[in-house]
Image: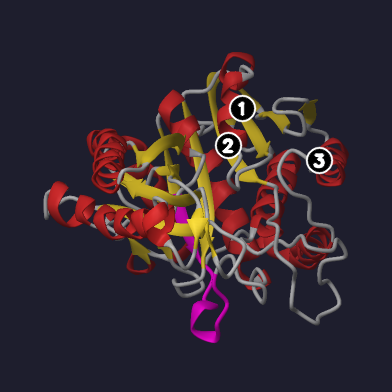
Amino acid sequence: MPIVNRIAEFHADMTAWRRDLHAHPETAFEEHRTSDFVAAKLEGFGIAVHRGLAGTGVVGTLKGAAPGSRAIALRADMDALHIHEENGFAHKSLNQGKMHACGHDGHTTMLLGAARYLAETRNFAGTVHFIFQPAEENEGGGRVMVADGLFEKFPVESVYGMHNWPHLPVGHFAVRTGPMMASYDIFEITVAGKGAHGAMPHQGIDPLLTGAHIVAALQSIVSRNVAPLDAAVVSVTQIHGGDAWNVIPESCVIRGTCRSFEPRIQDSIEPAIRRIAEGVCRSFGATMSLRYERRYPPTINTAAETEFAAGVADQVVGGERVDRNYTPTMGSEDFAFMLQAKPGCYIFLGGGTAEKGGVLHNAHYDFNDETLPIGASYWARLVETALPRSA
């Protein structure tokens, strides 16, 4: 596996960085220690540092040994999740109720490793911006960085992202042109009825019964409103209502998430939820209100940049280890906002831990340190290939 020799030499350093970050997880927009850690490393490498985008965001800027007007950006996310870690190793979380259960500690480390190597060699022409983004999980830090002027302050022709993927073997990459990950929407339906004694239901309007019918009817959106060859998910994930054995409550709340790969499908789901909920409530004599939020758009890779990224992955691990038509996932990613602003590509890097139970967002998850030099080598080769000195 032709990883960069120099990067392999400081694999132990990267492992130490990654485990330090894992032990000190910080959640959305609170990544102050993490931001300080990243900025200090970049400055130590001799890279210019800008701080403050999206609050805790960090951008490092490095110019190559040869002059050039072209510029690209590489992005890693820094935030952790609100999960109580169940691991017992020495670098487990020291922050109660917070955990790097999605591998962002590894993402940050791999980009730092590439930054260190590129700062030492500068074997490229032009400029690379290293974007360290806060708040990927749920809160849309990527959207905030773009809105704060990321690409006005740091103009680039393309932007690239990467995520560890436990379901792929170590040393493998997966990517595809077009939708790579789904949109992420949330909904909240409040059903208002009329409270009554549990023994005298005829005197009230039962919001729980109404809500149960809404939950069942929402399943018809995908099965009967979305074309069979299209893909969508509508999942109810919470139902809240009532707090006594013998009281029919005044109201209940139904919450859930919606996913799709196509904006036109995303556009159709919200009105379908409203139509169904209003219709069911009307039939039971209840009323409803709907809150619907579009959190993340689909993560859509552009064709030229995807082909380029796959070619770089070929250089690092060999073509037989790069899946160029990987099945997209209904998970979501706020790198989508950067891909709305600039052409680019989001690629998966094999972690090889799924068969052992090491899946994302799990209280026992830990990033596989074996992959650190592979990911860092991919980033380094991507810069050297995109911005060649000979050009």
Q: Kindly identify which residue carries mark 2.
A: 140
Residue 289 appears in which quarter of the rendering?
top left
The span shown in magenta is: 347-359
Q: Position of residue 32 (x, y in %)?
A: 85, 41
Q: Kindly identify which residue carries mark 3.
A: 35
Contact, mark 2 vs mark 1 (Cβ under 8 Å): yes
Residue 297 visible in rendering: no
Q: Position of residue 117 (x, y in %)?
A: 71, 48
Q: Which mark is residue 338?
A: none
Q: Say few, some or many: other residues with alpha carbon within 10 Å of mark 2 (under 14 / 14 to 19 / 20 or more).
A: many
> Marks 3/2: CA distance?
17 Å
Q: Position of residue 353 (x, y in %)?
A: 55, 78
Q: Say few, some or many: other residues with alpha carbon within 10 Å of mark 1 (under 14 / 14 to 19 / 20 or more).
A: many
For residue 354: magenta? yes
Q: Earlier in the sequence, mark 3 or mark 1?
A: 3
Q: Which mark is residue 144?
A: 1
Residue placed most toward the observer, 179 or 332? 332
